[in-house]
Amino acid sequence: MTGPSSSSRVLARACFASIAVAAATPVLATEGGGGVYPYGLNTVASGILPKPGHYLYMYNSFYAADVTTTDDGAAAPVDFDVDVRAHTLRYLHAFRDVTLLGGGLGVLVAQPFIVGEANVGPASGDAAAFGDTTVGVMLGWHRPTLHWMTGLDITLPTGSYSETRLFNPGRNQWAGTFYGSVTAPFARRFDANVRTNLTVNGTNDATDYRSGVEAGVEWSLNCKLGKGWAVGLNGYSARQLSDDKIDGETAAGTGRRLRVDAFGPQVIYRGTSWGATAKWQQESGAHNKAEGDKYWLQLFVGL
């Protein structure tokens, strides 16, 4: 990364600092080996803007990994262990009488609280603090057999951060995530969901580190069982499109571009004005990040 003299400190940061955020708010690439968007989050009704009203979401995730990877995807030769819990509260408001380009309008704010512990080689660190706040705006359209949505999430550098700390709940940078998503019901009992993301990162002014542009896709295929229940498969693929930069120079001479894939099962329950989802995602094919397992319990309620 920055050079041989600081390789241990930067490796530690590249392994963990953003893993916490990756597991939390509205994951990818970059300083800390994670990102501002938590890949794997939006795998249920991802293209549907709710009907007008107020909604409260609670996203709980647990991420565990005992290996981190190099530029070529090999396991890094270092003792490694990370456990991160993220609890994110998100408020969404869909407007009743406001439309734009024929679509409904919604706004959101999301705030994570992150608890994590990291061990890399002889170093260790832990933290329990608020992560970075995200605010967003979205537009949604509906048809009988297709729902789609687009929007922009802005992540603010409000989370707890210290340049000397091994594990950081915050990233100390601005970022913007542009997205488009669709939900397509078919064959009466099934639905398919796809969401694509593009994240542009700002610079961490404490380290002069600027993470590269991130892109990825989340997906799911679900089958309704009746009485509000559904089961399905879900997953994500994330890639870094441009190099990480330190002081304007390519980080580590390679750019430390991140990539990862994941998939697993999910179980969904949808009541009259509330719902819940439990899911598991197992990562594979990681480059320049930890490779582990992610578990979710997601809840929402209409207010």
Image: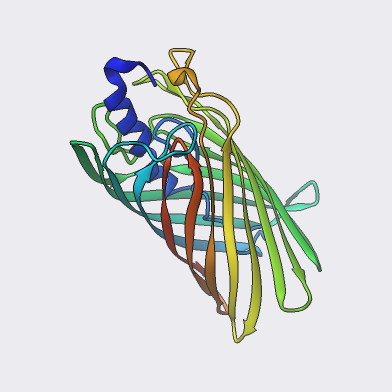
In the rendered image of this protein, does residue 224 appear above or below residue 120?
A: below
Indicate how the structure is coloured in the image: rainbow
Task: Where is residue 172? Give x, y as percent.
Answer: 38, 30
Q: Does 294 sit left or right of 44 as displayed? A: left
Q: Nearer the viewer, residue 158 or 71?
A: 71
Q: Residue at x 58, y 62 (%)?
A: 234
Who's the residue at 52% across and 55% down the image?
41
What x and y, as percent, mark residue 143?
81, 63
Q: Work out which quarter of the rendered image holds the N terminus and state it.
A: top left
Query: Vertical placement of 51 versus 216: above or below?
Result: below
Badge count: 0
The quarter of the picture where residue 118 lies is: top left
Where's residue 167, x and y in %?
28, 38
In front: 301, or 219?
219
Res. 220 in view: yes
The outermost residue toward the top is 248
Q: Quadrant of residue 238?
A: top right
In the rendered view, tell whether residue 225 sits above or below residue 279. below
Q: Is residue 43 visible?
A: no
Q: Nearer the viewer, residue 116 or 64?
A: 64
Q: Is residue 192 left or right of residue 274?
A: right
Q: Residue 100's spot in the image, x, y percent?
A: 75, 47
Q: Residue at x 55, y 73 (%)?
A: 268
